[in-house]
Image (spheres, rainbow, N blue to C red):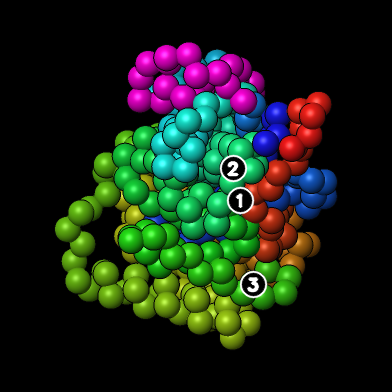
Amino acid sequence: MTGSARAFAPASVSNIACGFDILGFALQSEADDSPGGPGDVVTATQGVRDGRAGPCGPVRITAIAGDDGRLPLQTGRNTAAVAAAALLEAEAPDASVDLEIEKRMPLESGLGSSAASAVAAVVAVDALLGLDLPPATLLRHALAGEILASGGAHADNLAPALFGGLVLVRSLEPEPDVVELPVPEGLTCALARPHTHVNTRESRSTLDRDLPLERAVTQWGNAAALVASLYRNDLELLSRSLVDVVAEPVRGPNVPGFYDAKQAATEAGALGCSLSGSGPAVFALCDGRDRAREVAAAMAAALEHALGVDCDRLVSPLPAPGARVIEAGRDAGGG
C-alpha cells in the first residue's frame, strides 16, 4: 500500500448541445504539461480509524486550497469525500483516508467542478490502497459525489473527467456503460468563461420534466447525428447536429450575453456553439486551433460587453486526457 497518492482530474464540457446528460468531453490547455489545464488535484493519505462519526466517517478532509473558502470541510457535504467514502464502503471497509483538495478550476462555472473533485478523489484513493479497480467501478463510486452536488445521477462530466476524450454515457444501471467516441482530426474546443456563477442543482430544477414528443424526437435525431458525424469524420453533419432543444432554451435566457456570444461564435466560423453544462461557460467546436482562438476571443468579447465582467478563454485540442495519478509515494518499508 502506498503512503500517499495524488491524482488529477480535468474539467469537462457536458451535454455538447444535443446530448443532455449523456455526452461530454475532457478539456486541456493548448500547452498541456501533466497535468495541464483546469481541473482538480486530490491527495489521499492513510488515515487512522478513530471512531469518526457521520456518513463519511472513514474519510476526513484536512485541507482545501483554491476555493476561496467556499467549499465545506465537512465530509458529508463535500463531493470528493462522499465519493471516496462510497469507494471505501464497497471496496475497503476497514480502511480510512485523509484527503487534501486543490481546486484548479472555478466553482459553478459549467465545467464540471464537482465531477473533477469526485473523480480525482476516487482515483487517488484507488491508487493509495492499490485496488486497481476498473474504470466503470470508479465511475460508480464517483457518482455519489455528483448526486450530492447536483441532485441527480448523471455522468456526462464524470465520464470524460475519468476516461478522457469524448464519451457517450449509454447507461448507469446496472453498471455504468461508457462508450469512447472517435474525434475528427483537428476538432478543437473554444471556450469562454465569464466570472459569474450558475448553481447546477438550481439550474437542473428549472428544466421541463414533461418533454413534448416532437422536441424529444428532434433531440434524439441531433444526438444520433452527432455520434454519426464523429465516426464519419463529417464536420458539416456535426455542425448541423449541435442544436439543443431541451436545456438551452431554458438555461440560455438566464446567462446574460449567451446569445450574443453564440452569434459571435457563428460569425467567427465555429461549427456550433452552446452552453457548457448549465453555464455560464460557453463552448464552441471548431475546425483547427487557429479558428478556435478567433472564436474564443469573439465569445469572450461578447460576454464581457454584456456582463461587464472579465472572461477567461481556453482553447482545448481534442481528445484530451482524463484523470491520472501524478504522484504515488511509498512508506519506508515499500509495499
Q: Tell me the CA gap for discs 2 and 3.
A: 29 Å
In x, y percent, where is residue 309?
Answer: 58, 30
For mark 3, give the secondary structure.
loop
**Residue appearing at x 49%, y 57% in the figure:** 136
For mark 1, give the secondary structure.
loop
Q: Quadrant of residue 68?
A: top right
Q: Tell me the CA gap for discs 1 and 3.
A: 28 Å
Badge 2 vs badge 1, beta-carbon distance below 8 Å: yes
Residue of label 2: 126
Q: Main secondary structure of the magenta part?
A: loop
Lateral position of residue 196 relative to residue 82, left or right: right
Could you tell which of marks 2 and 1 lies nearer the N-terminus?
Answer: 2
Could you tell which of marks 1 and 3 lies nearer the N-terminus?
Answer: 1
**Residue appearing at x 59%, y 57% in the figure:** 163
Q: Quadrant of the N terminus?
A: top right
Three-letter code, disc 1: Asp
Residue 60 lies in the magenta stretch: yes
**Residue appearing at x 59%, y 46% in the figure:** 131
**Residue appearing at x 50%, y 19% in the figure:** 49
Q: Is residue 249 above or below residue 236?
A: above
Three-letter code, disc 2: Asp
Badge 2 vs badge 3, beta-carbon distance below 8 Å: no
Residue of label 3: 183
Residue of label 1: 132
Is residue 173 something one can see in this rendering? Answer: yes
Q: Which residues are magenta?
A: 46-67
Q: Residues within 10 Å of mark 1 (few under 14, many from 20)?
A: few
Q: Foreground residue, 140 or 3?
A: 3
Q: Quadrant of residue 211?
A: bottom left
Q: Foreground residue, 229 or 293?
A: 229
Three-letter code, disc 3: Val
